[in-house]
Amino acid sequence: MASYRIAAPDEYLAITGMGIKNVKICKAAWVWPFQRCMRFSVQPHDYAMNLQAMTKEKLQFLLPVVFTVGPDVGSRTGNPIPIPGLEDDPDLAPRQTQENGDDDPLKKYAILLADSRTSPKSDNSRQFVENIVKGIIEGETRVLVSSMTMEEIFSEREVFKRRIFRIIKSELDQFGLRIYNANIKELKDAPGSVYFESLSRKAHEGATNQARIDVAEAQLRGNVGEAQRKGEQEREIAKIHAETAVRKTERDIERAQAEAILETRKTELNRDVEIARIAATRQTEAQDEELKREVEKKRAAAEIERLRAKEVVKATIEREAKQQAADALAYEIEAAAKANYEKEKQEAEALAYRQRADVEVAAYRTKQEADAWAYATLTKADAELQRTLKEAQGLAAKAEALAKMRDAFGGPAGLLQYMMIEKGTYIHLAKANADAVRGMQPKISIWNTGAEAGEASGSGNPPNGVAALRNVYQMLPPLMTTINEQTGISLPEWQFGRLATNMSEVERAKAAAAK
């Protein structure tokens, strides 16, 4: 019965069956008899993964990524949605496809959901699509990372991101899927690896040591500048004082005393200034030496830490290199095993498909042969039935004729006698007896059927007709007895009974006539 189906805003209808060449994708349509309709959602889903990959130098690391993947509906809405941040890449730009054409993404996605053999809204269908998407992302990312060095991944992050998207997009296109958003987070150390931790510690220690050196140099410049400013200040003060004293001594009164005092004060001031300068110089030099010693100590400590970290990092890197080499070998063995497993699985599936096809062909052939045999058997049985009916009709007619003959011959015995005579049974019996007794001593019976066979010589002879009949009658009993003894066949007695009765009547008539 026909029904009108309407999809939700985030759904589409996939219709197959009569009148549709392959698959019809639409939002609303009539579903006629001999057609099937499936609803499927086009909402994108987030796939968060923590990929473990290995670089060209056999360095393992974790790459946390989050991809938002869903069916490509941009070609139908007329507003293709580019990948954020990668709009200028022509290889990643969305493509316009013909609606319901062979290259329609929603048609590919509907066929993908049909392969899951479950309802598109069930968890099994979503898990089926999730396994495909995660498998593509993990496989292509590992292949790409294995062809790049760690330095290339760090220095060319944008190129690395574009290459990942380009490879994944080409793989998702065949299933009608596309990337709506992607986020590649910072690289992390794989379990058992401290590569990024060592690099971070090295950068942190280098920055700390450089900061300490910069602080020491700044303190040195500050102390020296402070001492210089103090010396200049004191010199300016002394100069002002000296000028003031000179002006005072210019007075005429007490000029000499003033000059003497001035000289004395000059000497004292010069001495004090020199002492102060020398003290300041010595103090500055002492502080400078102290700062140099502190800087050298810190520099030596930093060098010791650097050498120690270098040795530790070197040992760690050697240990990690050995571990990574072993992991790489294990990964190669595992990859080879997986490849062999997939190959054997595909071969087994192909063999199973061929065997299933052979079984179906054999079953179809057997069914055709069985149908032909059944038809032939039915035809043969029908012919056999017709033949049997004809034979039964012939036997019925023959039985009816034999019944009439039995009535004509006076009973079954007469009919049997007639049939034996007609078929020459007696002749065959005689021949068989002759063959059986040939060369043997047969039993010879002599019957006397003449006038002397029981009659006195003086008695009258019966008429010739009666005598002949009597002779035949006297011959038959011994003949029948002989046949019965040699063959076991007993002839019917009705004939002999009639003959005996007739002969008795003849004998009684003859006796009466003689009297």
Image (tube, helix red, strand yellow):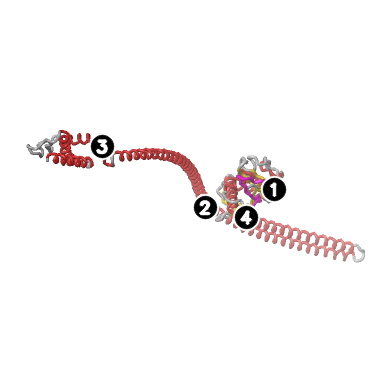
Q: Answer whether residue 394 is visible to the viewer in this image.
A: yes
Placement of 97 over or under 311, stated as above or below: above
Question: Furthest-left residue in view?
Answer: 458
The x, y position of residue 276, in whole percent, is 76, 63
Nearest to viewer (mark 1 / mark 3) = 3
Depth check, front residue: 76 or 215: 76
Residue 34 forms part of the magenta stretch: yes
Q: Give the range drawn in magenta.
A: 27-45
**Amino acid marked by disc 3:** Met
Label 1 secondary element: loop
**Amino acid marked by disc 4:** Ser
Label 1 – label 3 distance at C-alpha: 116 Å
Residue on which the image places disc 1: 84
Label 4 secondary element: helix
Label 3 secondary element: helix
Label 2 secondary element: helix
The crowding category of the residue bearing disc 1, from other C-alpha atoms within 10 Å (few below 14, some 14 to 19, many at least 20), is few
Residue on which the image places disc 2: 323
The x, y position of residue 229, in whole percent, is 78, 59
Q: In which quarter of the image is the C terminus?
A: top left
Residue on which the image places disc 4: 200
Side of 275 where 438 appears, left or right: left
